[in-house]
Image (tube, rainbow, N blue to C red):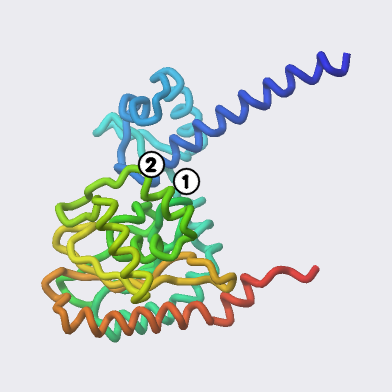
């Protein structure tokens, strides 16, 4: 009797896990993709039926995780999802540790200073201090980007453990601009160079008219957790400016790494 009653429960658990996974996949599409998505696009991207997608969307809308937009006949993130995102960002202790450093980096360079965090095999902007200049670059906090495109991602990728780095390189390497590095042999050479120099430079790799310089951000555990960068219009990133920014972002990342607030919050509990 015990064995017979256990089997249905395992089956139910499996189905529940699959459903939860699909719901999470739908939400992640909104986090890393277009602002608006329709049933057909979600179905095509995830390889699940439109009927299943529609049921998931209805459930998420009822909980205000998503909301409909009559003008586009699509869906977008709702107020509950935004509240979760804000709560999650508030929990990143590194943001508090990095804030004064980013502000000073912005003032020293006159360009936007940004903090990126490693999330899975991608990165996400966690914070920024915008340039005071009229023509400037701003970043989309909370949006995910691939690690191979741009200095902020490449400098993280260069310092990942070899097996994890190779797993990323084995996956798709989308060309976001004509300057995005997608040739794996060339990318490996650039990653090796980045690891030697401790800094990465991007000139139009993620956005055609933008440039950036980034340094890896290591945590108290010695692992790479993200990056610190300055970014702005490409025409202002002259060789002289880039050389100056190299030293500034490296110093900024090192300062954040040794910030006592981050060290204290990241320390394991003795309880």
What residue is shown at x 19% (from left), y 82% (from top)?
Answer: 241
Whether residue 235 can be seen here: yes
Query: Which is nearer the eye, 76 or 11?
Result: 11
Classed neighbour count for the residue bearing mark 1: other residues with Cα under 10 Å, few (<14), some (14–19), many (≥20): some
Query: Which is nearer the eye, 57 or 175?
Result: 175
Whole-Å distance between the Cαs marked 1 and 2?
10 Å
Q: Position of residue 21 (x, y in %)?
A: 53, 33
Classed neighbour count for the residue bearing mark 2: other residues with Cα under 10 Å, few (<14), some (14–19), many (≥20): some
Please, what secondary structure does the residue beneath circle 2 have?
A: helix
139 lies left or right of 100: left
Which quarter of the figure is the N terminus placed in? top right
What residue is shown at x 22% (from left), y 50% (from top)?
Answer: 176
Residues under numbered marks 1 and 2 in contact, where contact means CB atoms less than 8 Å apart: yes
- Marking on residue 81: 1
What residue is shown at x 55% (from left), y 71% (from top)?
Answer: 222
Q: Position of residue 203 (x, y in %)?
A: 19, 66
Q: Position of residue 10 (x, y in %)?
A: 72, 23
95 lies left or right of 247: right
Q: Which residue is mark 2?
A: 30
Q: Residue furthest right?
A: 1
Please, what secondary structure does the residue beneath circle 1 have?
A: helix
Q: Position of residue 220 (x, y in %)?
A: 58, 73
Check the image and report above or below for 226 versus 146. Answer: below
Q: Residue furthest left?
A: 235
Question: In the rendered structure, which disc, 1 or 2, sits on the residue that comes first in sequence?
Answer: 2
Whether residue 129 can be seen here: no
Using the rendered view, name the quadrant where residue 140 is placed: bottom left
Which quarter of the figure is the C terminus placed in? bottom right
Check the image and report above or below for 30 versus 41. Answer: below
Using the rendered view, name the quadrant where residue 135 is placed: bottom left
């Amino acid at each position: 009797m015990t064995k017979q009653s256990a089997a249905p429960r395992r089956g139910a658990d499996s189905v529940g896990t699959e459903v939860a996974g699909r719901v999470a996949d739908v939400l992640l599409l909104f986090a890393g993709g277009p602002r608006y998505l329709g049933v057909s696009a979600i179905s095509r991207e995830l390889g699940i039926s439109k009927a299943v997608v529609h049921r998931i969307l209805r459930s998420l809308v009822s909980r205000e995780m998503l909301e409909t937009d009559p003008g586009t006949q699509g869906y977008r993130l709702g107020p509950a999802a935004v509240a979760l995102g804000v709560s999650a960002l508030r929990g990143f202790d590194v943001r508090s540790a990095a804030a004064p450093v980013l502000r000073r980096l912005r003032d020293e360079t006159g360009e936007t200073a940004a903090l990126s965090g490693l999330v899975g095999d991608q990165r996400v902007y966690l914070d920024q201090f915008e340039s005071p200049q009229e023509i400037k670059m701003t970043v989309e906090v909370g949006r995910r980007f691939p690690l191979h495109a741009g200095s902020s991602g490449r400098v993280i990728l260069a310092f990942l453990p070899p097996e994890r780095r190779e797993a990323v390189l084995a996956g798709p390497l989308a060309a976001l601009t004509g300057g995005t590095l997608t040739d794996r042999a060339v990318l490996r050479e650039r990653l090796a160079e980045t690891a030697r120099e401790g800094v990465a430079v991007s000139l139009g790799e993620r956005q055609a008219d933008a440039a950036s310089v980034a340094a890896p951000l290591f945590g108290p555990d010695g692992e790479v957790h993200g990056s610190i960068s300055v970014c702005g219009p490409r025409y202002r990133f002259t060789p002289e400016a880039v050389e100056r920014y190299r030293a500034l972002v490296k110093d900024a990342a090192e300062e954040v790494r040794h910030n006592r607030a981050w060290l204290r919050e990241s320390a394991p509990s003795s309880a």
